[in-house]
Amino acid sequence: MKVKLQNLPHFSFIGCEVEILGVRPSYCREYFSVPSDQNFADAISDALEALRNGSAEMAAVYYERIDVEGHHYGPWSEQRKSALKEVDKAMSNMITQIKNKGLQHDVNVLLFSDHGMTDISWTDKVIELKNYINMSDTIQMKDRGPVVSLWPVPEKHTEIYQKLKAVEHMNVYNIQDIPERFFYKKGKFVSPLTLVAEEGWFIVESRDKLPFWENGTGKREAWQNGWHGYDNELMEMRGIFLAYGPDFRSNYRAPPIRSVDVYNVMCSLAGVQPQPNNGSWSRVECMLKNTAVRVPLCTQSSCVLALTLLLLFWLL
């Protein structure tokens, strides 16, 4: 994808300013804060214009408001629903622009998220590690919430493991015991102990270290009401994948796919050979037209101009 990435502008996309394998996108509108609805609409218009004038072959647009509102107020809150309505409006305007620019036979749109979200309650579903172990017996603790990485003092490892193993509503794994389906245990930065909470439960060292947010009072004291990062097999952790364009079947509902499968869809549309990956072509080929060839070559009539919109929430 290196060649394609050189003609890939990013709009409010986290990390687009970073060089990866010697490649940078042709244009990067850096992410500094949560993009407004107007920022989102403008980014879509700018991306479509870049596709129309030939300065880009692919474009990626990032929108975060659904995720933010879901965290602050909960996945089923009116605030989250309001954000979803704005996305719906933006998608309607985007389709109108595609038709007005005469791109309906050239542009494929992928709309996808990287996770879902579930309700959390800090009233009764918080696991405070300090209540079960002496935190001075640990060297380091990383993150809080559904998954926590813990580095015990080596001689205290077994003791801490046994104590945490008895705690309800979470699982504790030594590196070798981490489930294979997480595709995680072989990472060089994996901690000696990994703690995984049950859905809706929140792991933290102590309540005073919960990630409160500022809700207009000037103080970071408001509770979060939604979270993600739990076991990816849980229904509420599922993301979405929607697609529109000349290379996709119309009115077709595909069986569930995995996030890692999206890469193969993008490679197929771009007409490039994918690098080795954990995705499955068999899970996605059914949604594309004319997929007899595993990786179709890109023709002039379908040179695959793809606009990617990343929404961080499960939309139904």
Image (cartoon, helix red, strand yellow):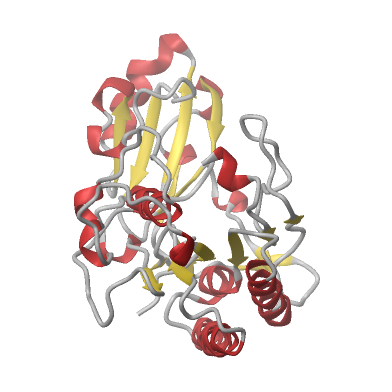
Residue occupying image coordinates x 51% and y 81%: 80
Left or right of 25 in this view: 90: left
Tell me residue 42's x, y (percent): 72, 78
Residue occupying image coordinates x 77% and y 67%: 219
Tell me residue 62's x, y (percent): 60, 64
Which of these two is toward me, 263 or 258? 263
Residue occupying image coordinates x 38% and y 74%: 246
Which of these two is toward me, 141 or 262? 262
Tell me the quarter of the picture where residue 291 sits: bottom left
Tell me the quarter of the picture where residue 49 sits: bottom right
Which of these two is toward me, 248 or 173? 248
- Asked whether residue 272 is in view, the answer is yes
Left or right of 225 in this view: 209: right
Residue 309 lies, with reference to residue 141, above or below; the image says: below
Tell me residue 192's x, y (percent): 40, 21
**Could you tell me how many numbered marks the image carries?**
0
- Asked whether residue 122 is in view, the answer is no
Tell me residue 82's x, y (percent): 55, 88
